[in-house]
Image (cartoon, grey):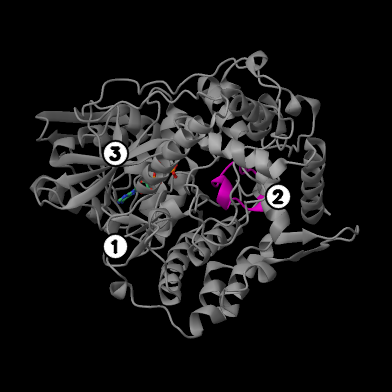
Amino acid sequence: MGCINAKQVGNVVAASHVSVVHHNSSHGLTFAAASFPQKQQPRSIEVARDDEKSSENGKTMDHHHVKRSSESRKSKRWSSSRRRSGSFSFNFGFSHRIVEAEQVAAGWPAWLCSAAGEAVHGWVPLQADAFEKLDKIGQDTYSSVFQAREVETGRMVALKKLQFDNSQPDSIRFMAREITILRRLDHPNIMKLEGVITSRFSSTVYLVFEYMEHDLAGLSSSPDINFSEPQVKCYMKQLLLGLEHCHSRGIMHRDIKASNILVNNEGTLKLGDFGLANILTSKNKHRLTSRVVTLWYRPPELLMGSTSYEASVDLWSVGCVFAELLIGKPILKGRTEANLYFGYAEIFRFSHDRYRHAYRNCLRERCKDIPPTALNLLEALLSVEPHKRGTASSSLISEYFYTKPHACDPSSLPKYLPSKEIDAKQREELRRKKSRSRIRDSGVSRRTRRSCNTSVEAINFGKTALKEEVRDDTQFATKSYGFTASSLRGRDGTAHRAPPPLTGSSSFSWAKKQKDSTSTLCYNRPSSLCQPSDAGASSFSVSNAKIFELKKQESQDVPGNVYTASEQQEQLQNRSNRHNKFDRSDHFYSSVFQAHDFSAEFHQEDVIAINNDMVGTDAASVILVNISVFFRLMNIFYS
Ligand SMILES: Nc1ncnc2c1ncn2[C@@H]1O[C@H](COP(=O)(O)OP(=O)(O)OP(=O)(O)O)[C@@H](O)[C@H]1O
């Protein structure tokens, strides 16, 4: 832990040459940053400017910063006194190099200070040996989450290990964006970032959070848990309050899903995982990436490739979570975009005339058991037109929250056994194993499985070819909706690499390396190896007819991270060249999907389901239906 005896430099109007002496006791290092030439305009990135706004608004960003030792308390005083004075050395054009030197003296690694020093400004790093790592409690697209015990206090925490390439400044800045955004937020229903673990010699960064026993994916998919109406209201209220806070700070979450909504044993709900979040500014308003939000929770406008959207994307995702809580399973499940079109088509029955907005919402007909006030809110949140979704604030004053039975008090919620998405995945994996062995016994051939995967690849027509997509996104210029020949072409299978190991050596002896997540799926092989489907009709990876079953089924799919096959392939391909394509304003997605192991996403029982569902259905007509739905959605958005 760094102890800094530093001059109160923050509120000093810089002279042209400044001498600052730092002493870092824990590392026995005395650092003198003397006579650095003063730069009047420090390098700044967008997030830094946003932080300034926050600071100007009098918001203290890190008053919950963990108190670890006397050293850290000193440092805290140091940092908070700087903020009290309303200063941010970046604001005053203080020498960036001096600030960088201060941060290195405080114990931050130089690569972090030079690329994204703004993110950790005023903080000192926590030390890895202050925590004892316990179990892995989350493993996802670009990070691992561990339960850990704080050695000094015995308190449980969650450590989120961020994956990035510390030789690439842009990659570091993306990673740092999550920290910056988390520091801007301060609300009981938002996961509070308590500190960051790293050291001057480390290439690894861990975020420290309060430990939460459950996430909503784990709870809602648990076969033993059925939420009552007051419970659902209680969770929804807390979720909307947290979201209202985010949006009031100009932050779009862009990955709201049940597994990112954490709940502790006191019944407090906190919105977590701001890895895809972004700050909406006038600059980036029309240049956002559409490849955010996990597929099941993704609003139609993003599916259509919109690069100009607003916080209403989060409202759609909240609607999906709401439905999940009400009906006990995700409302829009699909492993491909094509699947989702079907899901939308189920909700919004498109009429066959050519008038604008010629669709109607069929939720009401399909959710007869849901109370009318809940249905009204659900219908609003799941509006195809973003402006009809309202806001988090307007949802909070909807009739739903004012009709009986009212939301229960969080403290009165039942105490559940720890339940997380990872537990749900394990349950599901067990179920699948059993099911697979049943299938083996019944003699289903491997060939069927392969043919399914091939078809998924071919049917993923919703986006243009990889290169086009990356170029378009990098330039933020055009929207592309690809029914082009190239988009239908098979993948060549080249450049599929597993995520590289983290560069440099970690100072955390207990930190495990990421597992190689090279996909085992067909589309990671040369396309010539992908045999055409015998079944012909097996065009989808999952039963379309079952997407929208509203009653809880025994065989639930695991909620959580579902990205389309094309996206996952894209992310794997992007790995090698993403840094060239990087655009710091919004292209975090390019580093997001790589570590995701999606090999488990195709299973033989799905194939069986497909074969059953598709009996008597011509594959070509299925494609036509999808194309039709796609164009109807386009008509709504762009007419
Ligand atoms: N503070 C916490 N306490 C307990 N568990 C947590 C905490 N934060 C995260 N988790 C668990 O780890 C899982 C993954 O966390 P998180 O979403 O932050 O990582 P991620 O890699 O960005 O995931 P994803 O890609 O799915 O969004 C969560 O679903 C949750 O179960």
Per the image, label 1 sits on a secondary structure element best described as loop
In the image, residue 392 sits, relative to residue 503, either above or below, namely below
Q: What stretch is highlighted in magenta?
A: 286-301
Residue under label 3: 206
- Gap in Å between the C-alphas at discs 3 and 1? 28 Å
Q: In which quarter of the image is residue 447?
A: top right
Per the image, label 3 sits on a secondary structure element best described as strand
How dense is the environment of label 3, judged by Cα within 10 Å: few (below 14), some, or many (20 and up)? Answer: many
Residue under label 1: 416
Q: Residue furthest front?
A: 442
- Mark 1 or mark 2: name the one nearer the start of the chain: 2
Q: Does the magenta stretch include residue 519?
A: no
Q: Is residue 290 magenta?
A: yes
Q: Are marks 2 and 3 in contact (CB under 8 Å)?
A: no
The type of residue carrying mark 1 is: Tyr
Q: Can residue 463 be seen in this view?
A: yes
Residue 170: x %, y % from top left: 47, 30
How dense is the environment of label 2, judged by Cα within 10 Å: few (below 14), some, or many (20 and up)? Answer: many
- Residue 167 lies left or right of residue 494; in this view the side is left
How dense is the environment of label 1, judged by Cα within 10 Å: few (below 14), some, or many (20 and up)? Answer: some
Residue nearest the viewer, comparing 218 with 619: 619
The type of residue carrying mark 3 is: Tyr
The type of residue carrying mark 2 is: Phe
Q: Quadrant of residue 320?
A: bottom right
- Mark 2 or mark 3: name the one nearer the start of the chain: 3
Residue 472: x %, y % from top left: 69, 32
Question: Nearer the observer, disc 2 or disc 3?
Answer: 2
- Mark 3 or mark 1: name the one nearer the start of the chain: 3
Question: Nearer the observer, disc 3 or disc 1?
Answer: 1
Residue at x 59% of width, y 41% of height: 335
Residue under label 2: 342
Quarter of the image for the N terminus: give it.
top left
